[in-house]
Image (cartoon, coloured by chain):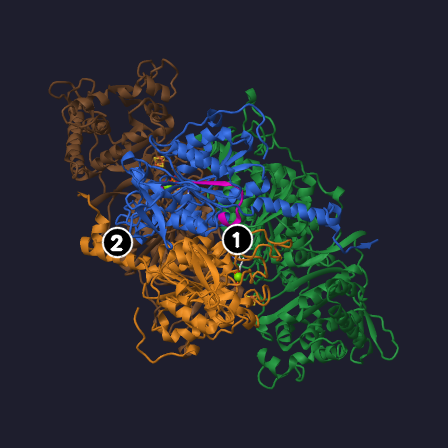
Chain colours: A brown, B green, C blue, D orange
Amino acid sequence: METVEKKAGKTTEVREADRVVVRFSGDSGDGMQLTGMQFSDTAALLGNDISTFPDYPSEIRAPIGTVAGVSGFQVHFGSKEIFTSGDEYDVLVAMNAAALKVDLPKLKKGGFIIANTAGFDKKNLGLAQYPEGVNPLEDESLTNYTVLQVDVTRLTKEALADSGLGTKEIERSKNMFVLGVLFWMFDKPLDHTLKFIEEKFAKKPEIALANEKTLKAGWIYGENTEIFNTQFKVSAAKLPAGEYRSITGNHATAIGLLAAAEKSGLPLFLGSYPITPATDILHELSKYKANGVKTLQAEDEIAGICSAIGASYAGNLAITTTSGPGMALKTEALGLATMLEIPLVVVNVQRGGPSTGLPTKTEQSDLLMAMHGRHGEAPLPVIAASSPSDCFDMAYEACRIAIEHMTPVILLTDGYIANGSEPWLFPTEDKLAKISVKFLDTPNGENNVLLPYKRNENLVRPWIKPGTKGLEHRIGGLEKQNETGNVSYDAKNHETMTRLRAAKIEKIADFIPLAKPDSGKEKAKVLVLGWGSTAGSIKMVVREMIDEGADVAHVHLKYINPFPKNLGELLKGYEKVLIPEMNCGQLLQLIRAKYMVPAIGFSKVQGLPFTTAELKEKIKDLL
Amino acid sequence: METVEKKAGKTTEVREADRVVVRFSGDSGDGMQLTGMQFSDTAALLGNDISTFPDYPSEIRAPIGTVAGVSGFQVHFGSKEIFTSGDEYDVLVAMNAAALKVDLPKLKKGGFIIANTAGFDKKNLGLAQYPEGVNPLEDESLTNYTVLQVDVTRLTKEALADSGLGTKEIERSKNMFVLGVLFWMFDKPLDHTLKFIEEKFAKKPEIALANEKTLKAGWIYGENTEIFNTQFKVSAAKLPAGEYRSITGNHATAIGLLAAAEKSGLPLFLGSYPITPATDILHELSKYKANGVKTLQAEDEIAGICSAIGASYAGNLAITTTSGPGMALKTEALGLATMLEIPLVVVNVQRGGPSTGLPTKTEQSDLLMAMHGRHGEAPLPVIAASSPSDCFDMAYEACRIAIEHMTPVILLTDGYIANGSEPWLFPTEDKLAKISVKFLDTPNGENNVLLPYKRNENLVRPWIKPGTKGLEHRIGGLEKQNETGNVSYDAKNHETMTRLRAAKIEKIADFIPLAKPDSGKEKAKVLVLGWGSTAGSIKMVVREMIDEGADVAHVHLKYINPFPKNLGELLKGYEKVLIPEMNCGQLLQLIRAKYMVPAIGFSKVQGLPFTTAELKEKIKDLL
Amino acid sequence: METATENKLSPKDYASEMEVKWCPGCGDYSILKQVQTVFPDLGVPKENFAFISGIGCSSRFTYYMDTYGMHSIHGRAAAIASGVKAANPDLSVWIVSGDGDALSIGGNHFIHLMRKNFDVNYLVFNNQIYSLTKGQYSPTSERGKVTKSSPYGSIEEPFNPSELALGAKASFVARTLDRDPKHMQAVLKRAHAHKGTSFVEVYQNCPVFNDTAFFAFSDKETKKEEAILVEHGKPLIFGNNEEKGIKFEGLNPVIVTIKESGISPNDLWIHDEKDKTKANILSRFFDTTQHDDEFPRPFGIIYANERPIYDENLVAQIDTVKLKKGKTSLNKILSGEKTWSIN
Amino acid sequence: METATENKLSPKDYASEMEVKWCPGCGDYSILKQVQTVFPDLGVPKENFAFISGIGCSSRFTYYMDTYGMHSIHGRAAAIASGVKAANPDLSVWIVSGDGDALSIGGNHFIHLMRKNFDVNYLVFNNQIYSLTKGQYSPTSERGKVTKSSPYGSIEEPFNPSELALGAKASFVARTLDRDPKHMQAVLKRAHAHKGTSFVEVYQNCPVFNDTAFFAFSDKETKKEEAILVEHGKPLIFGNNEEKGIKFEGLNPVIVTIKESGISPNDLWIHDEKDKTKANILSRFFDTTQHDDEFPRPFGIIYANERPIYDENLVAQIDTVKLKKGKTSLNKILSGEKTWSIN
Ligand SMILES: Cc1ncc(C[n+]2csc(CCOP(=O)(O)OP(=O)(O)O)c2C)c(N)n1
Ligand SMILES: Cc1ncc(C[n+]2csc(CCOP(=O)(O)OP(=O)(O)O)c2C)c(N)n1
Ligand code: SF4
Ligand code: SF4
Ligand SMILES: [Mg+2]
Ligand SMILES: [Mg+2]
């Protein structure tokens, strides 16, 4: 924050900033999610790198004005690379007293508060449980911050005085006023949002007009009012050149699956049952009917996976999506899929557990269930996405592995990256890896005999589509005779098949990338080994510390079963291995058991991502 | 085998033996299970130590005479302690050609074959898939054995010639003839079986008479026929003094649960859905209506556990029983029970997996599912029984831990010990550990406030029964505020509760026995570390090897989560740790991860217990 | 079940200290109110009420009642409730569930509970939508419904909950509406009085995701034409001026105009709660497509016929066997029938 | 579905090489035989048949048919079959299940399949017992049944499978019997011909665990009194000398003697497959306790009425949207609506 400039009429300081975190916070009905999205989309379109974090209550609409009803949307944007949605914010928009109460603790000292004074009346202060007579806007409690008081409600009403709209509609536009103010404050143009308004309310021109008016009124308010005397300039980031779009993890997962279907030439089938935070994948895919996508909203999670098993058996690229409680229900059927050796992708968007737990919060606590949550020896590949856009890559990978290795695959993402968004240098069709599919069409054994469980060099059996003439055969969940697939109770055969199923999964290690440091060298004092959505925080901290001269490196695992072939070797290069996880140490257990490396766990179970500060402190302890 | 004697009329050699293994083998309809049971009960009543192993096909009645239809029952009995049902047999009873074909490979060289010649006619040889014209009884193939050919079918018919019974009924008695022969051969009295016949056919005296006649005819046939010229004498074992009974693992589990209910004064509730090999526990408990036991055959496994959760909530000692596929279905609800912190015992009688797998065979492959098969961080105690009678102790323990620590507990047994039987020095009521139950009856917080999640010194919350005046409150699967139990989405509180739930389970280590060697010393070259039903084989081999001077020891784990407190220390006393399991190395993974001990796995996945020979070889490799 | 001896409680004694967190205008508020209103009159000591709910907006109900309660997992409330009732038949057990919770994921427990006939009350708040997960069609949503998961319209035939319950042998089937407090109170009282599983479908408005779905049945302008209140022993009459009646032609119900055609109320279909055939036809008024006329939606007790109760029989069987065989002592259980001693 | 163009196959072309492993005398043999007998006549190429079964003695069926088949897991066959059919509507999908598999653990998928109306055939071999697990009562076992899990008699009311299916909006409900091969063949053909989910309950004798449960309906001495064959458009007549008929008195069926009372067959209840009210009453002959007379058990097509089919509509919706919106290219999917470039 350096440069200072003057503007006509009033003095405005313009500060340059590398990275800024803005937190929009208000009541669930205040439209904060939409406001935040518009703001971050605009920032992204202008070339900032961004990361967003929606953070809302699990009630549909908790009582208005209460602490439980606060809904937040956090945007971290910058002219440098952004890896997380930010530990603390520079600017807090507080639409009411409850919002201030909930979100003040993470506002940086010296940060800005834009407070909607109408949300700090007696009623709101009471609902937010401030003691009788206390109003934080009026006492000394906010002296460490720059407080900008705006009576958003009144100003919106004034702006729309002759719009002919009712109070309720006018009230609903007030988030646009705030957005206008923010656009002024960060010197961003209104175009993107104006276009959005036009499209969204195409059928309700009077509402469109009202929103436009209010948005502009907000901008003008910023421009003209004395209290707004600071503007921030966050230049475009030096991101790799190319076409970008903004994407959330769930959206990326959906189109990753779609892309795999298109590239492999297989029809896409999704059998799913709604559950937070996975439902958006179902929503997204059900829009693609025109691409032949079949989505089946099943009666429960068991029917979700079972219908997918049926569809895979019939030759579709079959998917089922869910979160923890639903994942638990799918385990029996997942055992069947393992035994059948058919392709199937199971997406688990993890959330806080156990049981119903914290449905709208994030966690990484389903890893061991993914690895071991089936009866009997039922190994299958487990992979994990590390950021919103990485959900695309890993969903695509999940399909590729499932098809090419004839196996169910579990893809783990989580609420943080599923709902969070970031700019994505999206690929074009031709850049996507090939996925080879071959259905068997003639008997594969000697003497024209069909051997449904005869394996190729990768231990993979053929995929055989019902409807193929001459290949009629039966498969099932009972143990199978090697090669023929007939039921077999033979002791030795069971051992053979158990080992073969395991070896087939192990063999996948030959078809995935080797592990290598994301940051740092192949030898160092401390390795930070992560998986999943902690990638951003770890990357940020480790890079910072390397810049500061620390002997630290970061390896991030996207393939957990099997592990990359070189992982054991790689780990030997580090004196200490730290594994931060949003669980009680699940990857930790797998790494210790497999490589006998005395890795150290760092665990956080708060339904929230790691902050860079806490990570840094922990790493420092080990150096 | 030493003494020789003479009997009137013919020369009979009487051999003394320490241990003998007899395998009864025939078609599923031949009554081999019953014959084997009668034989082993008699041996047990006469003071032999015994171990039995029923081994039957998963079809109800596979086609008569085929290899798939062979049903076996193995009895190992002796004048010394018996720990397993035996690797190989001394005597094989083969009721037909298929039985011989299936079971000959494990007959000791020099062993006896009692062959029912009627089961070796052309049709039977064909069904058993012997090549055209080949009859093993007539060629050289059995020269290594003593073959006693008996036309059981004809002899039975003759014995019952004037019984007035039809061919079908007469046919059904032929197993009694064989039993009579065997009783003669092992010099056992007929009394026990005669009494059994009398009771079983109390309402059909003609059938009772026929069975008696045939049994006696078999005995007389042995006594008088020249080909039977060897008798075995297996003296009573030097077992600890006291009252004994014979018991299978499933029966022991059932009465262990019952005993816990009686001792704790709680009504027993079982919510269950039939599944092999666990169903007998449901059968057994449903007989105890007069003791107030409530059994509810639920519509599925989910309803099984859910009804048990309801019953526990209402203040009963609640149980649910199942096997692998059913266990998989229960995982979501198990997460709820963990969150509610209510007592619940889940018995998983493991069978061969994955999926439907090998339903009538044994395996230990559900351990990691028991540990980790739930979404979120949902730790709970896991314990395992090591022999049929130990099922009693561990079922009782499961109840004690569940009640005293307010937690669901998983008890693992498996098909081998569930169906197998052994003599049991059963306890009397007064010898059983106390189980203390205390329902909360007044508010436990200050100012007369109820705090349903306020914990005692063991981190255990109170059990509160609906119907208790003034303690009305709500609990559920959402994360709870510490102490009050109200819904809480607070980040720090979630971490606190997650850690508290884990610490509560860890704390149970203070209330279970320390680990100590079953055989051998606290320091040795090799430790064989086992869990569950492998106890017998390991014990037998390790004791033998110690007698032979080997530096080996055996520790058997019955408590797997938490492990005994001293386990880490204890393991340090051994140079090498070998973990034999009927899975691909599940305990192995837990031990390696927790104690960083480079334990070595020895895995067998054949639906069958370890043989002492294969175990011994493996241990020798390490010495 | 004991009867309360103490002073009568008031509705607010049944309100827990938890803040009610449904959206403004949600139909769930009314249901909560009616339940709290009738509870003091049921003669059950407060501590003997137990609410078991699944997951959904509706299932939060449990938290707002100052009784015993468990907010369990999605779809399993009925299974849990059967365990509660089996373990302690003295409790007055109330299941609260949504159309998704009860009829989608919970369908199996729903039908088996009806069949087994535990003496519990099963309230399904039917808003024809998955609300807690923010708006997907449910198994009671109408064909063609556009929702987040059916952007081009649902292609599914909905369940008719009362028809399904009857098919599963329910012994009590009723329907009521959030916007008719008095009616709901009456139905709740009858549900409580009925011995056996009482299934009550409550039409509940979700202003956020499926607003006005049932307004035709409560709005002044339409309700008299669109809804019919059925009462045991009374003829089926509806219409703005009570001028329409329903009578049978053979097995088929037809709508007639009472006065014009000279038809008297006595010629009409007289509602008989115990007649399953009538109940079945009544429940199928729903499928108006199967008839020439547009039939009104029935509200009230559609079917009520007592039959053996699971929890009662469970206890009765235990008592009988106890009497006949006597309790086995623990020592006898431990020793079994055959023992031997070794000295 | 294509029609077979090649030479007609014979029943034995549908027998797989697997040895059939049911117990001697098991009713399953007859069902297998009848299916293999009718299959060559259905006009479906052999490779287009797919059998999906659950777990149970009955579910082994799949192994014995030389078609495509999956012997899946307990209770889930219907859910898997719906995926198979959705993915490839050209297949002729047959679900084989037992009373436990379909109606106990599989109950939820059963009712939802009926509701959604996939064009598949659902055969339930009802032997009123869990056979594979060696004899526990099932949800169709009669009250009071003594089994291994109910040594003092079951206290549960059984489901009436056809009533349940109707309650779940089944579009085709039929009942037949292992011991009546011709009847079964006719029913199987009708099931195949019906577009939508065809539910066929087959009474099947389990000689080992529940012998003779249905013999009254097939034994010469009793069957004419105990069973009634219903045929569309024909009057309901039964009895040793075809002397009994069923007619309606109001909504109630009554048994009448035809000749004696001067009642002609035309006065009798004429079976109408499309009449759901009649189907409902017919299915409830089961509960004879509700009537004064002992009603015979109906066999045949109890209900058949076509309505929209899930898999057809799924494809139709895709076609419509395709036509209207056109396929989005993969590149367009990847880029989405809003992009920006960085150089
Ligand atoms: C096992 C499981 N699957 C899915 C969910 C997600 N979920 C919660 S409530 C709900 C449906 C809610 O609909 P309904 O039962 O109609 O209740 P409403 O919110 O409409 O009152 C779903 C799908 C869950 N919590 N658990
Ligand atoms: C998840 C699961 N639960 C339970 C079982 C055990 N089981 C197998 S078949 C069966 C019931 C069989 O009864 P039914 O469906 O009537 O078929 P039947 O054998 O009588 O033909 C049961 C309970 C299982 N295999 N899987
Ligand atoms: S979303 Fe609908 S059902 Fe849920 S609380 Fe809001 S209004 Fe009620
Ligand atoms: S047990 Fe019964 S149903 Fe099963 S194969 Fe044998 S006879 Fe058939
Ligand atoms: Mg709903
Ligand atoms: Mg059955």
Image mark 1: chain:
B
* Picture layout, residue B498 above or below residue B65: above
Quick check: is the Cβ at mark 1 less than 8 Å away from ligand 2? yes
* Closer to us: A363 or C114: C114
* Picture layout, residue C226 above or below residue B460: below
* Closer to us: A512 or B146: B146
Q: Amino acid at mark 2?
A: Lys
Q: Percent position (x, y) of residue B566?
A: 63, 41
Q: Percent position (x, y) of residue B309?
A: 54, 42
- Relative to A85, is B140 on the left or the right? right
Q: Is residue C117 magenta?
A: yes
Q: Percent position (x, y) of residue A244?
A: 21, 44
Q: Dot 2: what SS?
A: helix
Q: Quadrant of ligand 5?
A: top left
* Closer to us: B36 or B522: B36
Q: Is residue B439 magenta?
A: no
Which residue is tagged 1?
Answer: B326
Q: Percent position (x, y) of residue C72?
A: 48, 40
Quick check: is the Cβ at mark 2 less than 8 Å away from ligand 1? no
Point out the image quarter for the C terminus of chain B. bottom right
Q: Residue furthest bottom?
A: B133
* Closer to us: B206 or A176: B206
* Picture layout, residue A399 above or below residue B339: below
Which residue is tagged 2?
Answer: A289
Marks 1,2: beta carbons within 8 A = no
Q: Residue furthest left?
A: A8
Query: Going 73% across and 67% down the picture, which residue do you hit?
Result: B204
Point out the image quarter for the N terminus of chain B. bottom right
Which of the 4 quarters of the picture holds residue B442? top right
Q: Which residues are the magenta region?
A: C114-130
Q: Amino acid at mark 1?
A: Gly
- Relative to B460, is A204 on the left or the right? left
